[in-house]
Image: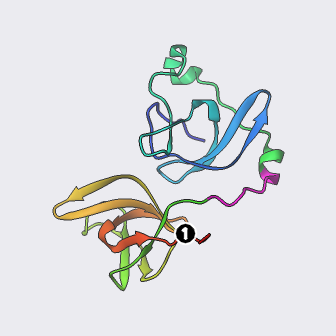
């Protein structure tokens, strides 16, 4: 369980919404790759269309994190759900034979995993960070690993429905 700060962007909404006790629960992936459930009423689209926790629409009485309500949908319902396939804008490795996924946006940082040319289904999130002449993008690999890559070596996947 984690508390998400107001104004957090880059949240990915997954699957259907569960209604329980008049609360709409939305399954999400946070920018740090953690999956969980949030009250869908507290999500609004950010500028590029991804959900974001609003900065001003929350009840101001929730200023003390200790007083924030925490709950989850019925676990049996959540575990039995079959999430529908979600169309995400995904990318694949191109223009290099091996792409290093690193712990930080720096070519000297530790390598998390190496991705071969053609690996697809890579999810981008967060802002691009420029370090020297390299533009770094935070990603989630198809295996769920997170790290930073040189964005110049990624290209959009073809739409599987075409």
* For residue 65, side relative to residue 73 (left or right): left
Q: Residue at x 39, y 71 (%)?
A: 155
Residue nearest the viewer, comparing 157 with 142: 157
The overriding secondary structure of the stretch rendered in magenta is loop
Q: Residue at x 80, y 40 (%)?
A: 74
For image coordinates 43% across by 46% down, the residue present is 48
Q: Position of residue 49 (x, y in %)?
A: 48, 44
* Magenta extent: 79-86
* Residue 111 at x, y percent in the picture: 36, 71
Label 1 CA crowd tier, 10 Å (few <14, some 14–19, many 20+): few
**For residue 114, side relative to residue 22 (left or right):** left
- The residue positioned farthest toward the front in the image shown: 162
Quarter holding residue 107: bottom left
Give the mark count: 1
Residue 61: image x %, image y %? 54, 13
Q: Quadrant of residue 104?
A: bottom left
State the residue lying farthest toward the left: 132
**Between 28 and 155, which is closer to the camera in this rendering?**
155
In the image, residue 34 lies in the stretch drawn in magenta: no
What residue appears at the point 46 percent right and 46 percent down from the top-left corner? 10
Looking at the rendered image, the quarter that the N terminus falls into is top right
Q: Is residue 36 left or right of residue 104?
A: right
Instruction: Say which element carries label 1.
Output: loop
Above or below, 51 relative to 156 = above
Q: How is the rendered protein coloured? A: rainbow
Give the x, y percent position of residue 69. Answer: 64, 25
Residue on which disc 1 sits: 159
């Amino acid at each position: 369980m984690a508390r998400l700060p107001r104004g957090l962007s880059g949240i990915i909404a997954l699957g259907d919404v569960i209604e329980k006790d008049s609360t709409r629960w939305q399954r999400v992936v946070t920018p740090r790759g953690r999956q969980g459930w949030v009250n869908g009423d507290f999500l609004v689209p950010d500028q590029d269309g991804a959900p974001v926790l609003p900065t001003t629409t929350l009840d101001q009485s929730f200023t003390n994190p200790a007083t924030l309500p925490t709950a989850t949908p019925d676990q049996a319902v959540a575990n039995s759900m079959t999430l529908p396939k979600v169309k995400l804008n995904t990318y694949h490795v191109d223009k290099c034979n091996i792409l290093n996924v690193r712990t930080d946006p720096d070519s000297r940082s530790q390598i998390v995993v190496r991705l071969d040319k053609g690996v697809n289904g890579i999810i981008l999130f967060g802002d691009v960070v420029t370090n020297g002449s390299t533009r770094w993008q935070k990603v989630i690999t198809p295996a769920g690993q997170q790290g930073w890559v040189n964005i110049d070596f990624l290209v959009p996947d073809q739409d599987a429905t075409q």
